[in-house]
Amino acid sequence: MRQLFFLSFFVLILCGCSKSYEAETSAISIEAVKLPPKKAEASSYDKDSDPVAAPPVKIKQEIEQKIIKEATLRFETDNLENTFNQIQLAVANNKARIINDSEEKDYGTISRNLIVKVPSQNFDRFISGVSKGVSYFEVKNISAEDVTAEYIDLTSRLKTKKKLEERYLEILKKANKVSEILEIEQQISTIREEIEAKEGQLKYLESRVSESTITISFYKIIPEKEGVKISYGSKLWNAVKSGFYTLSDLLLSLLSAWPFVILFVVFAYFIRKRLKRRKKE
Protein backbone atom coordinates (compact mmCIF):
# COMPACT_ATOMS: atom_id res chain seq x y z
CA MET A 1 0.00 0.00 0.00
CA ARG A 2 2.84 2.36 0.88
CA GLN A 3 4.58 1.58 -2.37
CA LEU A 4 1.39 2.44 -4.32
CA PHE A 5 1.09 5.72 -2.42
CA PHE A 6 4.72 6.74 -3.15
CA LEU A 7 4.33 5.72 -6.76
CA SER A 8 1.23 7.87 -7.28
CA PHE A 9 2.93 10.78 -5.43
CA PHE A 10 5.98 10.52 -7.72
CA VAL A 11 3.75 10.53 -10.83
CA LEU A 12 1.98 13.69 -9.60
CA ILE A 13 5.31 15.43 -9.06
CA LEU A 14 6.49 14.52 -12.58
CA CYS A 15 3.23 15.84 -14.10
CA GLY A 16 3.60 19.17 -12.24
CA CYS A 17 7.18 19.61 -13.39
CA SER A 18 6.24 18.93 -16.96
CA LYS A 19 3.45 21.57 -16.81
CA SER A 20 5.77 24.15 -15.30
CA TYR A 21 8.38 23.41 -17.99
CA GLU A 22 5.77 23.83 -20.74
CA ALA A 23 4.70 27.17 -19.23
CA GLU A 24 8.31 28.40 -19.11
CA THR A 25 8.99 27.34 -22.69
CA SER A 26 5.78 29.04 -23.89
CA ALA A 27 6.84 32.25 -22.10
CA ILE A 28 10.25 32.08 -23.70
CA SER A 29 8.73 31.60 -27.14
CA ILE A 30 6.48 34.64 -26.65
CA GLU A 31 9.43 36.80 -25.65
CA ALA A 32 11.36 35.57 -28.70
CA VAL A 33 8.53 36.75 -30.99
CA LYS A 34 8.71 40.26 -29.54
CA LEU A 35 12.38 40.72 -30.57
CA PRO A 36 12.99 43.22 -33.43
CA PRO A 37 13.23 41.54 -36.84
CA LYS A 38 16.36 41.56 -38.97
CA LYS A 39 14.76 43.87 -41.53
CA ALA A 40 14.42 46.57 -38.95
CA GLU A 41 18.12 46.29 -38.16
CA ALA A 42 18.99 46.55 -41.84
CA SER A 43 16.84 49.65 -42.28
CA SER A 44 18.69 51.40 -39.48
CA TYR A 45 22.06 50.85 -41.25
CA ASP A 46 23.78 54.03 -42.30
CA LYS A 47 24.89 53.62 -45.90
CA ASP A 48 26.81 56.88 -45.89
CA SER A 49 29.27 55.42 -43.38
CA ASP A 50 30.29 52.71 -45.86
CA PRO A 51 32.59 54.11 -48.54
CA VAL A 52 31.97 51.12 -50.80
CA ALA A 53 28.19 51.24 -50.61
CA ALA A 54 27.98 55.04 -50.96
CA PRO A 55 30.95 56.55 -52.83
CA PRO A 56 31.46 60.34 -52.54
CA VAL A 57 29.58 62.35 -55.10
CA LYS A 58 31.74 64.71 -57.21
CA ILE A 59 30.13 68.13 -57.59
CA LYS A 60 30.73 69.71 -60.99
CA GLN A 61 31.61 73.37 -60.60
CA GLU A 62 30.21 75.66 -63.26
CA ILE A 63 32.50 78.45 -64.43
CA GLU A 64 30.87 81.87 -64.52
CA GLN A 65 31.07 83.53 -67.92
CA LYS A 66 33.13 86.69 -68.19
CA ILE A 67 31.63 89.04 -70.78
CA ILE A 68 32.75 92.57 -71.67
CA LYS A 69 29.85 94.73 -72.86
CA GLU A 70 30.29 98.01 -74.75
CA ALA A 71 27.97 100.34 -76.65
CA THR A 72 28.14 103.42 -78.87
CA LEU A 73 25.04 105.60 -79.36
CA ARG A 74 24.56 108.68 -81.56
CA PHE A 75 21.25 110.44 -82.16
CA GLU A 76 19.63 113.80 -82.85
CA THR A 77 17.66 115.73 -80.24
CA ASP A 78 15.55 118.91 -80.16
CA ASN A 79 16.78 120.00 -76.72
CA LEU A 80 20.31 119.25 -75.53
CA GLU A 81 19.59 120.17 -71.92
CA ASN A 82 16.52 117.93 -71.58
CA THR A 83 18.37 115.02 -73.17
CA PHE A 84 21.30 115.46 -70.80
CA ASN A 85 18.92 115.54 -67.80
CA GLN A 86 17.35 112.29 -69.01
CA ILE A 87 20.78 110.66 -69.27
CA GLN A 88 21.67 111.91 -65.78
CA LEU A 89 18.50 110.31 -64.45
CA ALA A 90 19.45 106.98 -66.09
CA VAL A 91 22.94 107.32 -64.59
CA ALA A 92 21.51 107.82 -61.08
CA ASN A 93 18.98 104.97 -61.38
CA ASN A 94 21.56 102.44 -62.57
CA LYS A 95 24.48 103.40 -60.28
CA ALA A 96 26.53 104.54 -63.27
CA ARG A 97 29.06 107.37 -63.53
CA ILE A 98 30.07 109.87 -66.21
CA ILE A 99 33.83 109.83 -66.70
CA ASN A 100 34.03 112.25 -69.66
CA ASP A 101 31.81 115.11 -70.80
CA SER A 102 32.63 117.37 -73.76
CA GLU A 103 30.80 119.79 -76.08
CA GLU A 104 31.57 120.99 -79.57
CA LYS A 105 30.00 123.29 -82.13
CA ASP A 106 30.50 123.49 -85.87
CA TYR A 107 28.76 125.43 -88.65
CA GLY A 108 25.46 123.58 -88.52
CA THR A 109 25.28 121.57 -85.26
CA ILE A 110 25.89 121.67 -81.52
CA SER A 111 26.82 118.29 -80.04
CA ARG A 112 27.65 116.80 -76.64
CA ASN A 113 29.70 113.67 -76.06
CA LEU A 114 29.60 111.51 -72.92
CA ILE A 115 31.50 108.42 -71.81
CA VAL A 116 29.64 106.50 -69.10
CA LYS A 117 30.67 103.54 -66.94
CA VAL A 118 27.73 101.28 -66.02
CA PRO A 119 27.64 98.11 -63.86
CA SER A 120 27.29 95.18 -66.24
CA GLN A 121 24.12 93.91 -64.57
CA ASN A 122 22.44 97.28 -65.31
CA PHE A 123 23.68 97.55 -68.93
CA ASP A 124 20.39 96.76 -70.71
CA ARG A 125 18.30 98.86 -68.32
CA PHE A 126 20.58 101.87 -68.81
CA ILE A 127 20.36 101.58 -72.62
CA SER A 128 16.56 101.49 -72.33
CA GLY A 129 16.58 104.59 -70.10
CA VAL A 130 18.73 106.57 -72.54
CA SER A 131 16.68 105.43 -75.56
CA LYS A 132 13.40 106.90 -74.28
CA GLY A 133 12.11 109.57 -76.66
CA VAL A 134 14.71 108.86 -79.36
CA SER A 135 13.03 108.47 -82.74
CA TYR A 136 16.02 106.80 -84.41
CA PHE A 137 19.73 106.25 -83.87
CA GLU A 138 22.28 107.29 -86.43
CA VAL A 139 24.69 104.92 -84.69
CA LYS A 140 23.75 102.14 -82.29
CA ASN A 141 26.53 99.62 -81.82
CA ILE A 142 26.30 97.12 -78.94
CA SER A 143 28.99 94.47 -78.52
CA ALA A 144 29.57 91.61 -76.06
CA GLU A 145 32.98 89.93 -75.93
CA ASP A 146 33.36 86.62 -74.11
CA VAL A 147 36.72 86.60 -72.28
CA THR A 148 36.08 83.54 -70.10
CA ALA A 149 38.91 81.54 -71.68
CA GLU A 150 41.36 84.41 -71.21
CA TYR A 151 40.27 84.83 -67.59
CA ILE A 152 40.74 81.11 -66.84
CA ASP A 153 44.14 81.11 -68.55
CA LEU A 154 45.35 84.11 -66.52
CA THR A 155 44.05 82.60 -63.27
CA SER A 156 45.76 79.25 -63.85
CA ARG A 157 49.02 80.89 -64.86
CA LEU A 158 48.90 83.08 -61.76
CA LYS A 159 48.39 80.06 -59.48
CA THR A 160 51.28 78.25 -61.15
CA LYS A 161 53.59 81.21 -60.67
CA LYS A 162 52.63 81.53 -57.00
CA LYS A 163 53.32 77.83 -56.38
CA LEU A 164 56.68 78.19 -58.10
CA GLU A 165 57.48 81.17 -55.89
CA GLU A 166 56.64 79.15 -52.78
CA ARG A 167 58.99 76.35 -53.91
CA TYR A 168 61.85 78.79 -54.46
CA LEU A 169 61.23 80.32 -51.03
CA GLU A 170 61.51 76.86 -49.46
CA ILE A 171 64.74 76.22 -51.36
CA LEU A 172 66.06 79.61 -50.24
CA LYS A 173 65.64 78.59 -46.61
CA LYS A 174 67.84 75.53 -47.17
CA ALA A 175 70.52 77.29 -49.23
CA ASN A 176 73.90 77.81 -47.58
CA LYS A 177 76.20 79.25 -50.25
CA VAL A 178 76.06 82.95 -51.05
CA SER A 179 76.08 82.27 -54.79
CA GLU A 180 73.09 79.94 -54.47
CA ILE A 181 71.21 82.48 -52.33
CA LEU A 182 71.82 85.27 -54.88
CA GLU A 183 70.74 83.09 -57.78
CA ILE A 184 67.55 81.96 -56.02
CA GLU A 185 66.71 85.53 -55.01
CA GLN A 186 67.09 86.61 -58.64
CA GLN A 187 64.72 83.86 -59.73
CA ILE A 188 62.22 84.88 -57.04
CA SER A 189 62.42 88.53 -58.16
CA THR A 190 61.71 87.53 -61.77
CA ILE A 191 58.76 85.36 -60.73
CA ARG A 192 57.40 88.15 -58.50
CA GLU A 193 57.43 90.57 -61.46
CA GLU A 194 55.54 88.05 -63.56
CA ILE A 195 53.01 87.51 -60.76
CA GLU A 196 52.41 91.26 -60.43
CA ALA A 197 52.00 91.58 -64.19
CA LYS A 198 49.46 88.73 -64.25
CA GLU A 199 47.59 90.24 -61.28
CA GLY A 200 47.43 93.60 -63.09
CA GLN A 201 46.05 91.97 -66.24
CA LEU A 202 43.51 90.05 -64.19
CA LYS A 203 42.33 93.18 -62.34
CA TYR A 204 42.01 95.10 -65.61
CA LEU A 205 40.00 92.26 -67.13
CA GLU A 206 37.74 92.06 -64.07
CA SER A 207 37.14 95.83 -64.14
CA ARG A 208 36.10 95.67 -67.80
CA VAL A 209 33.79 92.75 -67.04
CA SER A 210 32.21 94.36 -63.97
CA GLU A 211 31.69 97.78 -65.62
CA SER A 212 30.53 98.38 -69.18
CA THR A 213 31.61 101.40 -71.24
CA ILE A 214 28.96 103.35 -73.15
CA THR A 215 29.77 106.26 -75.46
CA ILE A 216 26.82 108.60 -76.04
CA SER A 217 26.83 111.42 -78.61
CA PHE A 218 23.76 113.58 -79.15
CA TYR A 219 23.45 116.75 -81.21
CA LYS A 220 21.09 119.53 -82.24
CA ILE A 221 20.90 121.07 -85.72
CA ILE A 222 21.19 124.88 -85.75
CA PRO A 223 18.53 126.43 -88.04
CA GLU A 224 19.81 128.73 -90.80
CA LYS A 225 17.79 131.71 -89.54
CA GLU A 226 19.71 131.61 -86.27
CA GLY A 227 22.89 132.37 -88.21
CA VAL A 228 21.42 135.54 -89.80
CA LYS A 229 20.87 137.68 -86.74
CA ILE A 230 23.26 140.58 -87.65
CA SER A 231 22.03 143.31 -90.01
CA TYR A 232 23.86 144.26 -93.20
CA GLY A 233 24.89 147.66 -91.81
CA SER A 234 26.40 146.01 -88.75
CA LYS A 235 28.38 143.70 -91.02
CA LEU A 236 29.77 146.74 -92.97
CA TRP A 237 30.76 148.47 -89.76
CA ASN A 238 32.43 145.30 -88.53
CA ALA A 239 34.35 145.10 -91.82
CA VAL A 240 35.55 148.73 -91.43
CA LYS A 241 36.68 148.05 -87.88
CA SER A 242 38.44 144.89 -89.03
CA GLY A 243 40.32 146.85 -91.73
CA PHE A 244 41.34 149.51 -89.23
CA TYR A 245 42.61 146.86 -86.87
CA THR A 246 44.58 145.26 -89.73
CA LEU A 247 46.20 148.61 -90.65
CA SER A 248 47.08 149.22 -87.00
CA ASP A 249 48.69 145.85 -86.79
CA LEU A 250 50.75 146.61 -89.91
CA LEU A 251 52.00 149.94 -88.51
CA LEU A 252 52.86 148.33 -85.21
CA SER A 253 54.79 145.65 -87.08
CA LEU A 254 56.76 148.30 -88.99
CA LEU A 255 57.53 150.21 -85.80
CA SER A 256 58.78 147.06 -84.15
CA ALA A 257 61.20 146.61 -87.11
CA TRP A 258 62.67 150.15 -86.97
CA PRO A 259 66.32 149.01 -86.53
CA PHE A 260 66.15 147.10 -89.78
CA VAL A 261 64.59 150.12 -91.53
CA ILE A 262 67.41 152.43 -90.37
CA LEU A 263 70.07 149.97 -91.48
CA PHE A 264 68.41 149.66 -94.86
CA VAL A 265 68.30 153.46 -95.31
CA VAL A 266 71.97 153.89 -94.34
CA PHE A 267 73.05 151.07 -96.64
CA ALA A 268 71.07 152.54 -99.54
CA TYR A 269 72.61 156.01 -98.96
CA PHE A 270 76.20 154.72 -99.16
CA ILE A 271 75.52 152.70 -102.29
CA ARG A 272 73.95 155.67 -104.01
CA LYS A 273 76.89 157.94 -103.06
CA ARG A 274 79.40 155.45 -104.41
CA LEU A 275 77.58 155.16 -107.69
CA LYS A 276 77.68 158.95 -108.12
CA ARG A 277 81.49 158.97 -107.64
CA ARG A 278 82.00 156.38 -110.33
CA LYS A 279 79.95 158.42 -112.79
CA LYS A 280 82.11 161.55 -112.18
CA GLU A 281 85.32 159.63 -112.81
Image: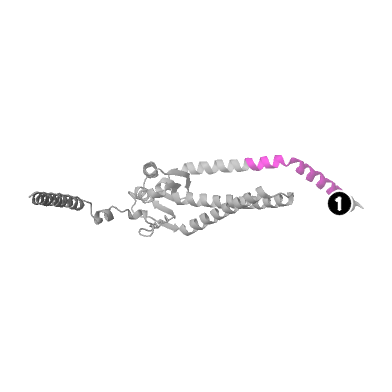
Are there few (<14), some (14-19), or many (20+) residues within 10 Å of tag 1?
Answer: few
* Residue at 67%, 49% in the rendered image: 174
Residue lying farthest to the right in this orientation: 281
- Residue 238, x across and y down, in percent: 52, 42
Name the amino acid type tagged 1. Answer: Leu
Residue 96 sits in quarter: top left
Residue 67 sits in quarter: bottom left
Residue lying farthest to the front in this orientation: 1
To which residue does mark 1 refer?
275
User: Is residue 177 covered in magenta?
Assistant: no
- Residue 25, x across and y down, in percent: 18, 52
- Establish if 233 lies above or below 45: above
Residue toward you, 261 or 9: 9
Q: Main secondary structure of the magenta part?
A: helix
* Residue at 86%, 47% in the rendered image: 273
Q: How is the image coloured?
A: one colour
Q: Secondary structure at mark 1?
A: helix
Part of the protein shown in magenta: 248-274
Residue toward you, 195 or 260: 195
User: Is residue 268 covered in magenta?
Assistant: yes
* Residue at 66%, 41% in the rendered image: 251
